Structures are given as structure tokens and as C-alpha cells.
Image (cartoon, rainbow, N blue to C red):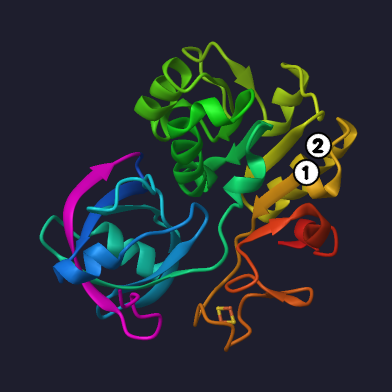
Amino acid sequence: MKKLSLTAPALAEIIEVRKDTDKIKTFTIKYVDKQDQKRFHFVPGKFLMVSVFGFGEMPISLSSSPLKTESLQLTIKDVGTITHAMLQLKKGDKIGLRGPFGTGFPIARFRKKNILFVSGGCGMAPLRPLVCAIADKREEFGELKLLYGCQNSDHVLFREDLKEWGKSGGLDVLLTVDKCTPDWGGSCGPVTVLFNKTEINPENAVACVVGPPVMLHFVIKELKKCGFKDEQIYASLERLMHCGMGKCAHCNVAEKYACIDGPVFNGTELAKMPLEEK
Ligand code: FES
């Protein structure tokens, strides 16, 4: 079957909008052309270039389960002009989609291994498809643990999924928030504080990390302290993107382009990248 175009945006319609926090919404979207929807599939970690007509195009990671391809979901935070315009859109409005682009998480390499997921803030959105794919084939993997840090208790994304993964997926979920409120009974501080609250064993394990570069820097440091080697670490790197196709150099980091060589990189590649600078 013909693939979805990487160069020309395909028209898509918003079929549902969910407000997750004051600045984050999750959009459920379908391609207008049924054939485009049939062609749609993705590996967790990949992203789409999303056109908001009249405002521009931006890279957004897919946040839905890769097993549900009859529609797709994008979880978007209001951080600039295009994201702000997107957050004003309603059910029935149209957008353009190019892609999916980039590399995804190499799930086949994770089989039989214990998996430590680490996420900061909106990083839970690109991580969700990976957890969904692994939870769906739970028996093929070892122990699953998620360390998740957010700004405050109102910013915990995908609460229903977290509960469900805990019950049926056998995922051990540990949460922390930067700003503690009296009603919050859990951990306080950045996601790295959770490394002291649970046993982290690097034996037969991989770590999948998604969050801003500065968080990746500190999380990878903690993972190394726990005994993880570079080749046991996978992380999705946020970078400014424009073309999504390795042409414009906007996403250049070290000798790589985040759009085609990433956004998911192995720890051996990440070791050569200046993560703490951005
Ligand atoms: S976004 Fe253009 S080279 Fe990566």
C-alpha cells in the first residue's frame, strides 16, 4: 500500500478535544481521506509535522496507542504561537499532517528485559505509545517500572492509563511533583528523587527516558550511578524542527539530525551530545 506523504500535508479532522491541564490538550484526530487513515501506522517515539492553517507547522510526537490506528492522538502544550493556535481549535476543525517521521523505540530489543520508564512533564505523551505497546504484550517483558515527575498534582497526564497499567499491565508507577501542595501525599522534587525511593537494578534492564534535555542529562547521570551502561539507555530528544526530513539542519545536534537519526537515540549516541545546554 502507498505510504503517507512526507512532503505534502494530508488533511485531517479533529474529532475530540480533551483538556488535560490549563495549558495542555489532547486531540483525537482522523485523516479526512479514509485511505490515508488505513495507511497510518507508527512505531512509538515517532512524530508528525502538524500544520495549523494560517499559523505554521510544528513537530508533535504521537501520544496514542500504536495498536489503535482508526484515529490518532496528539497531546499539545501551549508554548508558542502555533501551539497556542492549535489549542483554540475545536471538534470538526481541520489541520494538516505530514509523516510519521523519525526513529522509534526498538521494542523488539526490549523483549525479556526489565524496563524502567522515566518521564518528565509532557514527556509522558511520547512515552504513552511505548507503554501501551509493551503493556499489550506484557508476558514478553520482565518487570516494568515508571518514574514520572510533573510540575504539580494537576499536571499528571493520562491518570486513567496510569491506573490501568498499574492494574492489568503490572506497571509499578512512582510519581513526584515539583510543587507540593497540602493535598499531595507523595514525593516532592524532580524525577531524580524517585531513584532513592525504589530499587533500580540494571541487570537485564533497559531505561527509556523522555523529557526536556536538562532532565535527560540528570536522569542519565542517575542511571549511570545505578550501574546502567550507555547501551542500556534510550531517550527521545526534543529539538527545534522545521522540515522533518534532514534537509534544513534546524534539529542538528552533535553530528546527528534529531528528525531522521532520532528523536529516539541510544545512550552511546547521547554520550556525544550536549544535553545539559538546552
Ligand atoms: S528538521 Fe530539518 S533537518 Fe531536522
The quarter in which the C terminus is drawn is bottom right
Q: Which residue has dot 1 on it? A: 232
In the image, the residue with mark 2 has its CB under 8 Å from the nearest atom of ligand 1: no
Rendered residue at 57%/64% (across/down): 103
Sooner in the amino-acid sequence: mark 2 or mark 1? 2
Q: Residue at x 41, y 55 (%)?
A: 62
Say what amino acid the circle numbered 2 marks. Answer: Leu
Residues rendered magenta in the picture: 1-20
Please name the residue that numbered disc 2 is placed on. 223
- Label 2: which secondary element: helix
> Is 144 one of the magenta-colored residues?
no
What x and y, as percent, mark residue 113?
Answer: 68, 32
Is label 2 in contact with label 1 (beta carbons under 8 Å)? Answer: yes
Residue 14 among those drawn in magenta? yes
Q: Which mark is residue 109?
A: none
Q: Is residue 9 above or below residue 169?
A: below
Q: Which of the four quarters of the rendered structure image does ligand 1 lie in? A: bottom right
Rendered image quadrant of residue 238: bottom right
